[in-house]
Image (cartoon, rainbow, N blue to C red):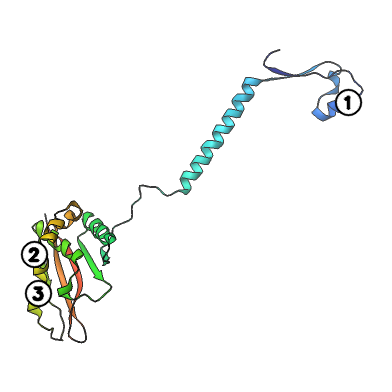
Amino acid sequence: MMGQIFLEIQTVTSGESLFSQYGLRCDTWPHAVEFPILFSELILMMTKLVFGLTILVVLTGCASTPLATESTPQKAEVHFIDLPSFDRNLGGSLAAQLPQVSVAFYDHIAPSALPARLQIWMAAVETGGGTVKVVPPKSSVTAKGPLLLISAISALWSASKTVQEVSARAQFRAAQAYDAQIMLRTDEQGQTLVDRVVFTQRSK
């Protein structure tokens, strides 16, 4: 019969060993023994088994893999590094519309030597209608020429045409929704340094 598996055991001297091997009953001897297992059913069973195992493997892999949509929260403090990565980090924090974002410094930065990369962000604030204020240091030590330093800082980006042009790029547009404060401090020798730059979101 097509589509079926037949097992026929003939009358031979080794018949009993075949019976014991396949677990067949001896009372059917010497008649043919038939196993009506359809090939189509066997293939269907195997297909379901393989499909089920595949689904199990896929689900296990998804459970152990973090979701790609999860994003890293933007930081409210960014350390200044004179590299393009600083622009990306600061731009990301400002674009996240955090109420306040601070820029800290690893090195001692003199106000008159404010890095050009940071000047661009100051110019971007003013381009958006914001204000940049220089906050004198709160210290018992008298700073050397504080008023001259404040005037010099404000003129750094205002007098640079290149800075003004670069600040209008889309990369710096997020700063246009903020005001900025350049916070100064004095060291033990009375030298005035930039402590940090604070971006504060303007009320809409």
| Residue nearest the viewer, comparing 102 with 146 | 146
Of label 3 and label 1, which has the lower sequence position? 1
Q: Nearer the viewer, residue 85 or 140?
A: 85
Where's residue 159, x and y in %?
8, 65
Q: Residues within 10 Å of mark 1 (few under 14, many from 20)?
A: some
Look at discs 2 and 1 and give the one toward the viewer: 2
Query: Around disc 2, counting alpha carbons within 10 Å, would you say few (fewer than 14), some (14 to 19), or many (20 or more)?
Result: some
Indicate the secondary structure of the residue bearing disc 3: helix
Quarter that holds the N terminus: top right
Residue 137 appears at what percent x and percent y?
A: 15, 78
Question: Which is nearer the N-term, disc 3 or disc 2?
Answer: 3
Closest to the camera, between mark 3 and mark 1, is: 3
Residue at image coords 84%, 29%: 20
Q: Indicate the amino acid at tag 3.
A: Ile
Location of mark 2 (residue): 158
Dot 2 amino acid type: Ser
Find disc 3 in the rendering and name its residue.
150
Residue pushed farthest top? 1
Residue 44 occupies quadrant = top right
Q: Does 150 sit above or below residue 72?
A: below
Q: Are marks 3 and 2 in contact (CB under 8 Å)?
A: no
Q: Count the marks.
A: 3
Q: Provide the residue designation for mark 1.
A: 16
